Image: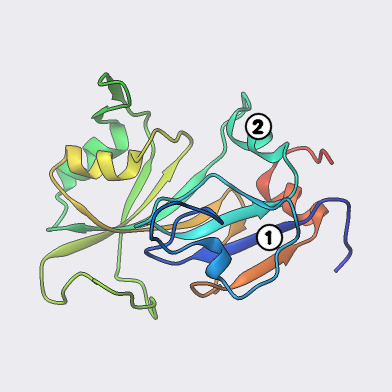
């Protein structure tokens, strides 16, 4: 590993953990992960307590603006388990765009996005409070280029399919792959920016 002034990591954020190192609440924290992170580390594109998967950590304070506030949208792909069997009509609604409530009480119609029904993932790690086997459910992959607060959950709610599990698989070409919950991987700066398809700024 070649170290630069800034360092870059991905983790597979476990269920029931917030994307923070400190909190006044009694919740799982990033500091609970058995890994020594450098000073000044912070999370990019946070996942909520009940969401899992790819989380970026870096000491580079410019990455958030480059990735989530740029004029060029960046793809984020999620694996989503929802209650009941998703019909073709509801699948098309999700793909075309649905109306969700946003912060402040207003409404927003989501942009067209890629939504696919997929088989149950093979060798998916189990977690506490897992959805009971045998109950009707559907697995989807949803790829977005926008990120309203709790957007994926609100989208599936809009077509009456409650989200039971949400795992972020990738941001552009930066992917979770076989990283297990709580595992950490450090990425070299050049690879990090190339996979995220943003210009390198240190």
Numbered marks: total: 2
| Farthest residue, direction bottom | 123
The circle drawn on residue 79 is: none
Label 1: how many Cα within 10 Å (few below 14, some 14–19, many 20+): some
Q: Residue at x 21, y 61 (%)?
A: 138
Residue 112 vertical placement versus 159 (above, below): above
> Quadrant where the N terminus lies?
bottom right
Residue 151 vertical placement versus 87 (above, below): above
Give the x, y percent position of residue 94: 27, 39
Q: Is residue 110 left or right of residue 9?
A: left
> Quadrant where the C terminus lies?
top right
Q: CA distance from mark 2 to mark 1?
A: 17 Å
Give the x, y percent position of residue 110: 33, 29
Q: Is residue 202 left or right of residue 11?
A: right
* Residue placed under numbered mark 2 in the picture: 65
Q: For residue 95, which quarter of the picture?
A: top left
Q: Is residue 180 left or right of residue 123?
A: right
Q: Circle 2 sits in a helix, a strand or a loop, which is it?
A: helix
* Residue placed under numbered mark 1 in the picture: 9
Q: Residue at x 25, y 29 (%)?
A: 100
Q: Earlier in the sequence, mark 2 or mark 1?
A: 1
Q: Is residue 117 left or right of residue 197?
A: left
Residue 30 vertical placement versus 86 (above, below): below
Q: For residue 65, which quarter of the picture?
A: top right
Give the x, y percent position of residue 12: 52, 66
Give the x, y percent position of residue 105: 25, 21
- Asked if the residues shown at circle 2 and circle 1 are in contact, with their CB atoms under 8 angstroms apart, the answer is no
Q: Residue at x 26, y 39 (%)?
A: 154
Residue in front for this viewpoint, 66 or 71: 66
Residue 61 vertical placement versus 30 (above, below): above
Q: For residue 166, which quarter of the picture?
A: bottom left
């Amino acid at each position: 590993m070649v170290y630069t002034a800034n360092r870059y990591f991905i983790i597979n954020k476990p269920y029931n953990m917030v994307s923070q190192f400190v909190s006044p609440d009694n919740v799982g924290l990033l500091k609970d992960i058995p890994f020594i992170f450098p000073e000044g580390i912070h999370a990019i594109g946070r996942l909520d307590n009940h969401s899992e998967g790819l989380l970026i950590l870096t000491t580079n304070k410019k990455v958030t603006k480059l990735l989530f506030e740029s004029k060029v949208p960046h793809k984020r792909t999620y694996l989503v388990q929802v209650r009941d069997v998703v019909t073709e009509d509801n699948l098309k609604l999700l793909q075309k765009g649905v109306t969700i409530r946003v912060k402040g009480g207003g409404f927003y119609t989501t942009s067209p996005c890629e939504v696919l029904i997929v088989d149950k993932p093979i060798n998916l790690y189990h977690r506490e409070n897992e959805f009971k086997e045998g109950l009707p459910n559907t697995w989807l992959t949803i790829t977005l280029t926008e990120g309203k607060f709790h957007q994926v959950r609100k989208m599936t709610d809009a077509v009456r399919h409650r989200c039971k599990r949400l795992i972020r698989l990738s941001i552009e070409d930066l992917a979770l792959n076989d990283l297990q919950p709580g595992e950490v991987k450090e990425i070299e700066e050049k690879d990090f920016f190339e996979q995220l398809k943003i210009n390198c700024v240190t």
